[in-house]
Image (cartoon, helix red, strand yellow):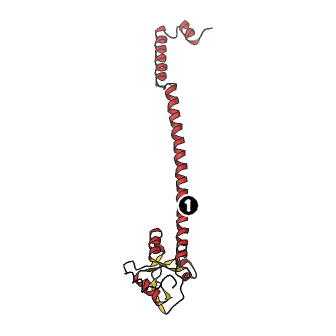
Amino acid sequence: MINLRDSLLKAGVVAKKDVHRVQNELRKEAKQSAGNQEPKAIRERREREELEARVKEEEEERRRRRLESIAREQEEIRLISTRQMLRANRKIFRPGPQRFWFRAPLPPQIWRLDLPERLAHDIRAGALAIAWCDDQHPDQRPDQRQEIVVIDRDVAARVLERRPELILFWNRDGADPDPSERLHPAY
């Protein structure tokens, strides 16, 4: 079987010298392209490293989502526990003759509580504080004063650490009144 090269040589269309030159050029190109290819072991190692990197990225993404979920759960627990702490430690009292005015969460409003005199005195002295005991902002509620509670300074300090926006009034700089002057737990 005669190939094209041999038939061109017999016909005298191409010179033998030109055929050798073209063959040498083709060999050089094949050698260069073979040299540019990376060996199989290196290529497999690179592919394995890329796969490991993708797996690691997916694991990091799963870890990040898990941490975000845990953070959301902890925030929810913090909100619920703060509300429970306020409700469990609030002072129960009957309205009294002493009017106590304090600023509502939004500036144009001032709210009033009718308190017993000793309770009003303890609030002014800083032994007690007034707090908001609900998850909603006070201005979003129709009957806002139902969720106002009076709490001890220790509870107020813990609430201030967790959710400072819930403390409506607390005279932290006030002197704690003499314990003999304070009415004890049952206001």
List x then y, in percent, for residue 154: 45, 74
Depth check: 32 or 184 in front? 184
Q: Point out the residue furthest to the right here.
A: 1
Q: Point out the residue furthest to the top here.
A: 10
Q: For residue 121, what is the image quadrant?
A: bottom left
Residue type highlighted by circle 1: Glu
Q: For residue 103, what is the image quadrant?
A: bottom left
Q: Residue at (46%, 90%) from the top-left corner?
A: 117
At mark 1, the secondary structure is helix
Can residue 133 be seen here? no
The answer to whether residue 21 is left or right of residue 66 is left
Quarter of the figure that contains the N terminus:
top right
Q: Residue at (56%, 82%) from the top-left corner?
A: 146
List x then y, in percent, for residue 18: 47, 12
Can residue 67 be seen here? yes
Q: Residue at (48%, 8%) from the top-left corner?
A: 16
* In the image, residue 1 above or below residue 114: above
List x then y, in percent, for residue 126: 41, 80
Q: Point out the residue furthest to the bottom here.
A: 97
On the image, numbered disc 1 is attached to which residue?
73
* In the image, residue 145 above or below residue 32: below
